[in-house]
Image (cartoon, rainbow, N blue to C red):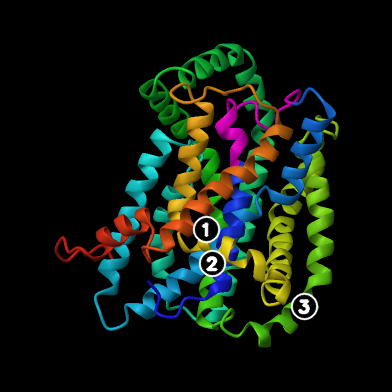
Amino acid sequence: MPKNRIGFLDFLRGCALYGILIVNLPYFAKPMYLVGSVGENTNLFDSAASWIVAFFFESKFYILFSFLFGYGITVQIKDWEGVESRNRYLRRMIGLFLIGLLHGIFLFLGDILLSYAILGCAAWLIREKKTVWLLRFSLGFLLVAILCRMILAFGQDEYRSRLASSLSGILFETRSAYLGSFWEGAKQRAKDTFISYPFTILFQWPSILSMFALGIIAGKTSFFERWEQNKNGLKKSIPWLLTLGLSGNLIYSIHSRHLFFEDLSLSWLLGFSILDTLSAPALTICYVYWLGIYYHSGASLPDRSWFESAGKFSLSNYLGQSVICSWIFCGWGLGFYDKLGNFQLLLLAFPIWLVCVFVSKIWSRFFSVGPMETILRTVTYVKFGNIRLF
């Protein structure tokens, strides 16, 4: 564990976990093919909830967590200075990969840990690059992200036409599996994870790498340790970022929830791809600034520790949220699969997050490291010989 832990970083992680849960809940609760689809919502409340999630949460909080992951890389390397940091880091990524693989099969088809483990190896290769190089790398992968979104946009009509003929059978199979036994659900989830991974690679990986690089820059420049000095510089960019973030996400949320005409020209699809890629990070930076102002003010004192507790044990909380959601929706638990609307899911997110935070606060009274963090640390610090992949 870092010797001088920064409370604001844990606070941000706790906020990111809540935002990620809100976005992930529909994928726990219903077949992935229905999330954000035409006709998904049957009433005004569900439609409004779906739009709120798209505008304020989608693509914002996994980006925030990716940025914090990149920041954490620099912290880990500083703590491991003078020891065999390469092998420790690689073992950590292997441990994260294995946890993510199990998570994707047994709990959640939208697992992010596999991606972090794979791309984290790439982040190791750029850790010592200069700030200017890292900034160019980050901007370059934002351009790659735009290209990937364009590929997805141009292929969506063909994908929908192929899916339409077999959709009813797929939905029946999916519902039967997730409402069946634990093992039936795991088999279907493994299949869904495999099917959805090309989309994950195109939609998330370039943005994740971009945010990793920005996080490494922030770590190298001690951005959060010097928050009071840096916030004024950040404040100057907020009006521009907010304008881009609000306008871009407004268009994205209207488009993604099918409030535009579906038959759009290539120029419109290109515009959506650019706005979608750039507006989410812009709004995320605004979130970080506002949360920083709030955290360092007296107003945050009553609830600061709740978010910090979640962020301190972020891996355990992320997986704990998946356990609770799987129990609520799958057949081996309460069996609410495909029975709740988006408005109900939006309301459900807070109590799930609160349960995990409450457990974290109790755990922190007795232990300084979370249960899943302990497992990952064990894999990180055990020696399996001299691994030479880098």
**Mark drawn on residue 40:** none
Badge 3: residue crowd in 10 Å (few <14, some 14–19, many ≥20)? some
Task: Answer above or below: position of 241 versus 113.
Answer: below
Q: Is residue 22 visible?
A: no
Q: Which residue is mark 1?
A: 310
Residue at 82 percent across and 69 percent down: it is 240
Which type of secondary structure does the marked residue at label 3 adopt?
helix
Task: Answer above or below: position of 145 versus 262.
Answer: below
Residue 29 is inside the magenta segment: yes
User: Percent from the top left, x then y, of residue 170?
Assistant: 54, 16
Separation of marks 3 and 1 at Cα, in angstroms: 27 Å
Separation of marks 2 and 3 at Cα, in angstroms: 22 Å
Q: Amino acid at mark 1?
A: Ala
Q: Which residue is mark 3?
A: 235
User: Percent from the top left, x then y, of residue 224?
Assistant: 58, 79
Which of pointers 2 and 3 lies earlier in the amino acid sequence? 2
Task: Answer above or below: position of 311 versus 322.
Answer: below
User: Percent from the top left, x then y, of residue 91?
Assistant: 28, 60
**Which numbered disc, 3 or 1, marks the residue closer to the eye?**
1
Q: Amino acid at mark 3?
A: Lys
Badge 2: residue crowd in 10 Å (few <14, some 14–19, many ≥20)? many
Q: Which stretch is magenta?
A: 24-40
Badge 1: residue crowd in 10 Å (few <14, some 14–19, many ≥20)? many
Q: Is residue 348 visible?
A: yes
Q: Which image quadrant: the C terminus? A: bottom left
Residue 194 image-quadrant placement: top left
User: Percent from the top left, x then y, of residue 204?
Assistant: 56, 49
Q: Which residue is mark 2?
A: 10
Residue at 32 percent across and 77 percent down: it is 80
